[in-house]
Amino acid sequence: MKLLFSDAGVQRLQQCVRGRTLCAFDFDGTLAPIVAVPEDARLPDNLRTLLERIAYYAPIAIITGRSVEDISRRLGFQPDFVVGNHGLEGVPGWEDLATEHEHACAGWHRQIDQALREPGWDPGIQVEDKRFSLSVHYRQVEDVAGSVRALESLFSHLDPPPRIVGGKYVYNLLMQDRCHKGSALSRLMELSGATSALYVGDDVTDEDVFRMRRPDILSIRIEPSADSAADYFLPHPRDILRLLEELIAMLQAEGASNWLREDRNGDRNGEPRQG
């Protein structure tokens, strides 16, 4: 993993935006700061303004662990693609798969609720039902290590067995198939006709994009990690602001050779699209 704001990183970013580029972003910890209560997360106004400017030159995708309904009310603008539940919900053509996930998720929720009603569980454990996946939060528990052991034991007995993806004081429960952020991004590139993409994320589920190691996808992680497969990293969450500003400058510099909105939907009017 290399620093994005290095000579090599900037050159790689310039190469990426020269094609028909899809700009894709995770939400929590990437565009929005991590907060103690997930319901409080919002897209900062200054980042929204920059994303709207980018959207004039290139399509934007938000690919998040939140549900589509949840994330849509936090953005304040309408990206070209909004994909929720770690890559399952909102991807055109995957509706039947989503139904299978919904049924499995409902079953897990019933099993977990039944277990948590038994004595001994920390009341700080919170189950977030995203319809197509579950997130079990433990940021508010008193005994983190004990709750982690108990939850992992509980998850090992769920039927059907879920794919467990850890995060920052959260476990994400998903079906064990090939629907994830990486496959979703690949599908969106096909649908949009993109010849390249950049993806920015900060957490374990974003590794499904990073691990693809595709030469046509520039992967960027928020903060360095020795365990990450991302190509480049931004040193601090606040550096997303600089990245968006650099993207705008590069896209503008490409001018007529770039993928302007009129090429994508025939209604270029010189103004960013509003939410």
Image: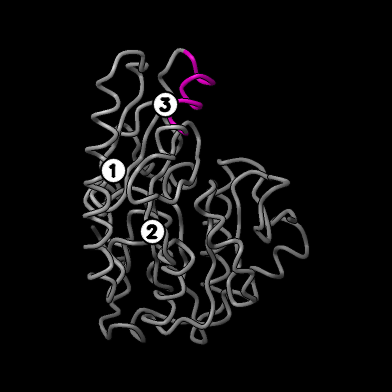
**169 to the left or right of 134:** right
Q: Considering the image in quadrants, where does the C terminus appear?
A: bottom left
Q: Position of residue 238 (x, y in %)?
A: 56, 41
Crowding at dot 2, Cα within 10 Å, few <14 / some 14-19 / many 20+, comes out as many
Residue behind mark 1: 108
Which structural element holds mark 1? Answer: helix
Magenta stretch: helix, strand or loop mostly:
helix
Kindly report the distance in space between the C-alpha atoms of the residues bearing marks 3 and 1.
17 Å
Please report contact status of discs 1 and 2: CB closer than 8 Å, yes or no.
no
Q: Which-is-in-front pick, marks 2 and 3?
A: 3
Q: How is the image coloured?
A: one colour
**Picture residue at 52% right of the left edge, 87% below the top:** 257
Q: Considering the image in quadrants, where does the N terminus appear?
A: bottom right
**Picture residue at 23% right of the left edge, 70% below the top:** 96
Give amino acid for label 1: Trp
Q: Residue furthest right?
A: 7
- The span picked out in magenta is 143-152
Task: Determine which of the numbered discs, if any, sits on residue 138 in the image.
Answer: 3
Kindly report the distance in space between the C-alpha atoms of the residues bearing marks 1 and 2.
26 Å
**Sequence-first disc among 2 and 3:** 2
Q: Is residue 264 above or below residue 41?
A: below
Q: Quadrant of residue 245?
A: bottom right
Kindly report the distance in space between the C-alpha atoms of the residues bearing marks 2 and 3.
25 Å
**Sequence-first disc among 3 and 1:** 1
> Is residue 107 one of those drawn in magenta?
no
Residue behind mark 2: 62
Give amino acid for label 2: Ile
